[in-house]
Amino acid sequence: MTLSTPDSVAPQGQGPLHGVRVLDLSAYIAGPYGCSLLADQGADVVKIEPPVGDNLRKYPSSLESESRAFLGVNRSKRGLALDLKQPEAQQVLRDLASRADVLVHNFRPSVPVRLGIAYEQLQEINPRLIYCAVTGYGDTGPLKDKAGYDQVLQTMTGMCAMQGKADGPPEILYGSVVDYYAAALVASGVSSALYERERSGRGQYVGVSLLRSALTMQSARMIWAEDEPREVGRDMRSGGITGLHPTREGYLYISANTPHFWAALCAKTGLDELAANPRYDSVRKRAEHRDEIVPRLHEALQARSAFEWEALFGEEVPCAAARTIEDMFDFPQVQAEGMVANYEHPVVGNYRGFANPIKYGRTPGPAPFAAPAFSQHADDVLAELELSSEQIAALKAQRAVL
């Protein structure tokens, strides 16, 4: 990989990671979506699956032929299936790794050694390889071989306890937030390691874990000053003023932390006396007296629907009516930013999905394409290893390649 000089212009649609080859051996969400983020930036990503496929393909889905989740987190990759329990498949992977820039997996720490693809083993054949391991809890410590899952880590690290009401049970955050943030850390960690490689000429190990992701997301809460008691206030929800509120029809999220926004909220809802009351003239005071303020606010919000309040507040009060994900496909701002693309899949057919998480002014990424059908690009990928058609046929006959 060669970094562009400031005054050079990359060909249209190549992206800042054009020329980088990524081998994605990971499954579920964190590793795969991290690799899709790299593909969005122009990397050539080859998704390598076991004979049974990525487990995410089997997740419940209202699509009959494929998992909606798999399509969503594996865009813009080529597909290849290898049975890494067979020596012939392990050799194919080593050959691919010898030519690759990046390898990403989410095996437990003991598995790569058994398969002959541990970092130290692949570093010998490709010293420039960036090797990213996505784990549940890290590669050291008492939990290193324990499988990690998004909502398990949410529960373990206090996220669920913080989401629940003070007098209620913990609550899960649905949407795999830990996985998706770990995916962002994968893309960030790999990209910075590639940048450092331009200086040193050497690859390195990059470790991302769901535990790190869950705690990184709580950096603003994970502060414990000397001599503080164990139980201290870590709630950042501004005492209930900032949050979801019922309206005459639907729910409205309101953020009114600054004096300006608080004053505008009171004026728009006819509660000017609250803005003038010195008992409520700071975020902390409003948090202390939330039981006095929130009922008044809810009563006022019954005058209009959530969408009517959203229009009335405009830019004066940060807010949003609660919408569904279906509303986002044709949402004007989403369309204006080019965040939805049309995809063609050999099994599913045509579908619309998310695209372009990052906007680059000079080096825009390539047009996204659909997640691969199972081992869809096996022949193309193996041909790049300069294997003959007879050799490819033999690998398939041995079921080392599917």
Image (cartoon, helix red, strand yellow):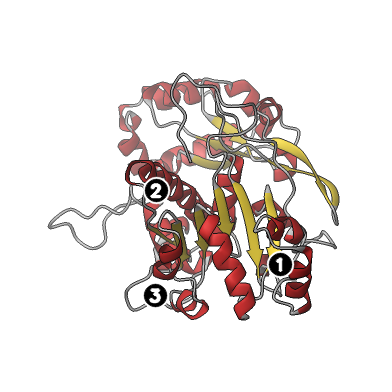
Badge number at residue 332? none
How many other residues sit within 10 Å of disc 3, few (<14), some (14-19) or many (≥20)?
Answer: some
Whichever of labels 2 and 1 marks the residue nearer the N terminus, that label is: 1
In the rendered image, which residue does mark 2 sit on? Answer: 193
Q: CA distance from mark 3 to mark 1?
A: 26 Å
Of the two numbered discs 2 and 3 in the rendering, the one whose residue sits closer to the viewer: 2
Residue 370: x, y in percent? 75, 48
Badge number at residue 144? 3
Whichever of labels 3 and 1 marks the residue nearer the N terminus, that label is: 1
Residue farthest to the left, as pictured: 227
SS assignment at label 1: loop
Say which amino acid is labelled 3: Lys
Say which amino acid is labelled 2: Ala
Residue 236: x, y in percent? 38, 45
Q: Quadrant of residue 355?
A: top right
Can I make out residue 30 in this image? Answer: no
Return the residue nearer the eye: 243 or 14: 14
Q: CA distance from mark 2 to mark 1?
A: 33 Å
In the rendered image, which residue does mark 1 sit on? Answer: 59
SS assignment at label 3: loop
**Quadrant holding the C terminus:** bottom right
Q: Quadrant of residue 124?
A: bottom left
Residue 174: x, y in percent? 58, 58
Q: CA distance from mark 2 to mark 3?
A: 23 Å
The residue positioned 42% from the left and 49% from the top of the image is 189
Return the residue nearer the eye: 209 or 44: 44
The residue positioned 70% from the left and 36% from the top of the image is 367
Say which amino acid is labelled 1: Tyr
Position of residue 99 in the picture relative to residue 80 (left or right): left
How many other residues sit within 10 Å of disc 1, few (<14), some (14-19) or many (≥20)?
Answer: some
Position of residue 383 in the picture relative to residue 103 (left or right): right
Q: Does residue 109 lie above or below 71 as drawn?
A: below
